[in-house]
Amino acid sequence: MKRALTTIICIWVFTTLNVFAQSDSTTKRFSITPLPIIVSDPFMGLGFGALANANFLTGNVHSTRYSNAQVYAMKTTNGQLAAQINHTIFTNNEKYFIQGKIQYLDWPENVFAFGGNTSRENDIERISYKALEFEERIMRKFGKNNFIGVQYRLYNCWNVSSNQVDSISFYSKNATGKQSFTSSSLGLHFIHDSRDNVQNAFKGNYAEVAINPNLKELGSTQYWTNIRVDLRTYKMLNSNLQHPQILAARVLYEQAIGDVPYMLMPMFGRYYTTRGYVQGRYRGNSFVSTEVEYRAHIWKAIGGVMFAGAHAVSETDGSYQYINPTAGAGVRIMLNKSQRTNLRVDYAIGKQNEGGLYLQVTEAF
């Protein structure tokens, strides 16, 4: 905790200086913010690296939201290495919405048995692997705030190894994709997005329905399908844009059908869901979570949040038997006022002594 507190103080100083340095950026069509990465959560421990965050307009400022692109590389105290390039682009008048990423991982992590009530003492196993992920979606606008389009995703995982011998390894005996696997999908996506800002919405709604079949004809080693429904809403509780109070809520459902690689099974932590548990602590063929967050301006570039939520992961028979709650609070430090880019500092608590500190850029949802 002392090391985490020191980290927060260092970020506080840096980002406060950065806020003042960018105070005149409100009229810019393009801005780029280089940042050191100092992140923390129960999954990664502490992570260190560098990030460049770019915000830009491709069209009319009154009819086109800011696009965003990021490049980062990071090493964590848990021995993980990640490098990623990602982008979210709105063309002029938001006729097209283009989003994607390419990511490399050299990644050890703890895995557990299936279901929502596994034991940390008896079921834990350390897995190491390398992975390359490519994802790109192109969406065409129809109506006022609706988009429909296709997404291609390639996930290649290799050099998978366990810290346990095969005779006692849950992963080696039960998991699909024991040593390597490839998932290649071409899916259909629908999005409704009336948020006033993609990174930090004050008002509006977001709904996504995605169906992604992974096919051997496209290069997958297994046939399986991922279905995801992501619903979010944002409501301003006052009318002051300089000192907003926002109530945000989210419901996420994910279902995997077929011969699903264990590393890609539905789980919390992915898509920034339900802070308070180590990512992948519970996995199953289906997953559902809900979160509510209250956000408020406090002073100058400082804001605060309180949040609560819960998730459930299916058991091997497909039923939901256990609910895992979470609650927490945090601080927000504004990095770029015109694009509402925040540094997020949260502490969340789950059940069974789960919990941890989260330092990230942009909101959880």
Image: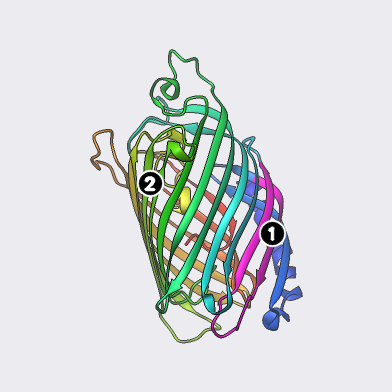
Q: Which element type, helix, strand or loop, lies under badge 2?
A: strand
Where residue 15 sits, quadrant-wise, is bottom right
Q: Residues within 10 Å of mark 1 (few under 14, many from 20)?
A: some
Cα separation, mark 1 vs mark 2, equals: 38 Å
Comparing 17 with 86, the one in front is 86
Q: Is residue 7 above or below residue 331?
A: above
Query: Is 58 one of the magenta-colored residues?
Result: yes
Q: Which element type, helix, strand or loop, lies under badge 1?
A: helix
Closer to us: mark 1 or mark 2? Answer: 2
| Residue at mark 1 | 11
Comparing 73 with 148, the one in front is 148
**x, y percentage for residue 69?**
64, 62
- Residue type pointed to by label 2: Asn
| Most common SS among magenta residues | strand
- Residue type pointed to by label 1: Ile
What span is in magenta?
47-75
Q: Is residue 345 left or right of residue 168?
A: right
User: Can residue 278 be seen?
Assistant: no
In the image, what residue occupies the spot 51% across and 48% down? 153
In the image, what residue occupies the spot 44% across and 42% down? 354
| Residue at mark 2 | 226
Q: Residues within 10 Å of mark 2 (few under 14, many from 20)?
A: many
Comparing 105 with 23, the one in front is 105
The number of discs equals 2
Q: Is residue 63 above or below residue 88?
A: below
**x, y percentage for residue 188?**
40, 56
**x, y percentage for residue 116?**
33, 39
Residue furthest to the front? 217
User: Can residue 134 be seen?
Assistant: yes
Q: Is residue 225 above or below residue 193?
A: above
Q: Are marks 1 and 2 in contact (CB under 8 Å)?
A: no
Chosen colour scheme:
rainbow
